[in-house]
Image (cartoon, rainbow, N blue to C red):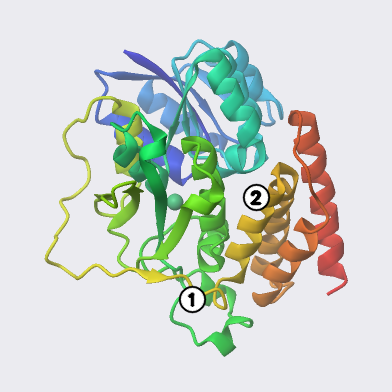
């Protein structure tokens, strides 16, 4: 029995993780559930799963459960809880401390949280190495790369990592209409339904930029050897080009339950939860990313080249800018302006988590000032 703790259990990835686990009650036990504020949904999950420990940001203790309450609840649990696998599916920089705490205890971390590697990649990878913790990605692109790289012991045989991108909701909008795209336009993702923030990040390809940074850290491949290609069908989830110009690609229907299942069951492969792929349904196409349509992708990758502080800043600025866009305060085209404005103010690398949290706070302030002065 693997004992699993799910942080961010009421979000999209958290719920799908529980769905996968529910299929495998003989293998997995959910020992703890954590969320920010959706307590009713979490308690319902706990009742179905027989979970006894709950982690949440505020409120009273709940009868019949062991409760960790407070902003640092998940972090405290990660440091002392009795679990084998920590699923980090929270949003925001809140994922970083629990991840570091679990790795320091040589635990297995299933990571769905972007900020952990975008902001703290150096710290996380060093900690994993030092303590022999295990970090496994649950993102479709990184799971694909991981599967393609799995039997490649020597990273020098890797020429390029190729991340695929759907292109998001605005991939066919005329360029001149882009800067004033509406919230409804941006949230109409052609291939799947996710949370609002990540759907906007798909349209801008900021999400893909973050995935480039994550891939750099996870697989130890330099930025100049990571490429993004537009792949409208979302069938190939990413690929690896090797030194001999051989390519390995991973294909499946676009369903997050597959990367979750792969990480949970690793190193085994168990029977399918997701549907079969209809290989005859449509031709697969790949195209270069148009910089004019997706200028923010370049901003994120440039930030990564300049160090972890600029990466942390661009992540913080994106949260602020997307929130302002969704609230109707700024035009779509201004997201890019705010990212550029904020990222340019930071350089260097964070030495510890305090550094990261300071940069995150400063960058949010600068991004908000940037929005006010638009
Ligand atoms: Mg992804």
User: What quarter of the picture does the N terminus occupy?
Assistant: top left
The residue positioned farthest toward the front in the image shown: 244
Q: Answer with the quarter of the image where residue 67 lies.
A: top right
Instruction: State the separation of the CA atoms marked 1 and 2.
Output: 25 Å
Ligand 1 within 8 angstroms of badge 2 C-beta: no
Residue 92 percent location from the top left of the image:
63, 43
**As displayed, is residue 164 above or below residue 334?**
above
**As displayed, is residue 272 above or below residue 278?**
above
Report whether residue 150 is seen. Answer: yes
Residue 307 percent location from the top left of the image:
71, 45
Q: Which residue is mark 1?
A: 170
Secondary structure under the numbered disc 2 in the rendered image: helix
Q: Which residue is mark 2?
A: 304
Return the residue nearer the eye: 275 or 157. Answer: 157
Which marked residue is nearer to the observer: mark 1 or mark 2? 2
**As displayed, is residue 24 above or below residue 225?**
above
Q: Are marks 1 and 2 in contact (CB under 8 Å)?
A: no
- Residue 114 in the figure: left or right of residue 320: left
Residue 111 percent location from the top left of the image:
49, 34
- Residue 157 in the figure: left or right of residue 179: left
Report whether residue 89 is seen. Answer: no
Q: Earlier in the sequence, mark 1 or mark 2?
A: 1
């Amino acid at each position: 029995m693997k004992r699993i703790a799910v942080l961010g259990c009421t979000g999209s990835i958290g719920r799908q993780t529980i769905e996968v686990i529910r299929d495998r009650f003989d293998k997995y036990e959910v020992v703890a559930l954590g969320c920010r504020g959706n307590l009713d949904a979490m308690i319902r999950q706990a009742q179905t799963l027989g979970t006894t420990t709950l982690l949440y940001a505020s409120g009273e203790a709940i009868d019949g459960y062991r409760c960790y309450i407070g902003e640092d609840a998940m972090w405290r649990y990660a440091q002392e809880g009795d679990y084998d696998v920590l699923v980090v599916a929270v949003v925001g920089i809140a994922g970083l401390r629990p991840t570091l705490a679990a790795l320091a205890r040589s635990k297995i971390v299933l990571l769905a949280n972007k900020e952990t590697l975008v902001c703290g990649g150096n710290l996380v990878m060093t900690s994993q190495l030092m303590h022999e913790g295990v970090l496994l990605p649950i993102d479709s692109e990184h799971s694909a790369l991981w599967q393609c790289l799995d039997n490649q012991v020597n990273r020098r045989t890797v020429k390029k990592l190729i991340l695929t991108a759907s292109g998001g909701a605005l991939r066919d909008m005329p360029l001149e209409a882009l800067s004033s795209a509406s919230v409804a336009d941006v949230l109409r993702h052609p291939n799947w339904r996710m949370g609002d923030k990540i759907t906007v990040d798909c349209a801008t390809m900021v999400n893909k930029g973050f995935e480039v940074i994550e891939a750099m850290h996870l697989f130890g491949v330099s930025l100049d050897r990571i490429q993004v290609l537009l792949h409208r069908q979302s069938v190939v989830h990413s690929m690896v080009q090797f030194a001999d110009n051989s390519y390995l690609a991973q294909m499946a229907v676009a369903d997050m339950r597959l990367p979750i299942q792969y990480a949970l069951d690793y190193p085994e492969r168990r029977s399918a939860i997701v549907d079969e792929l209809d290989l005859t349904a449509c031709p697969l196409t790949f195209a270069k990313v148009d910089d004019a349509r997706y200028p923010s992708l370049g901003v994120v990758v440039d930030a990564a080249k300049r160090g972890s502080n600029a990466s942390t800043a661009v992540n913080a600025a994106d949260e602020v800018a997307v929130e302002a866009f969704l609230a109707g305060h700024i035009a779509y085209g201004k997201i890019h302006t705010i990212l550029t404005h904020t990222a340019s103010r930071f350089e260097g690398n964070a030495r510890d988590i305090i550094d990261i949290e300071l940069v995150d706070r400063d960058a949010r302030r600068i991004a908000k000032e940037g929005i006010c002065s638009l």
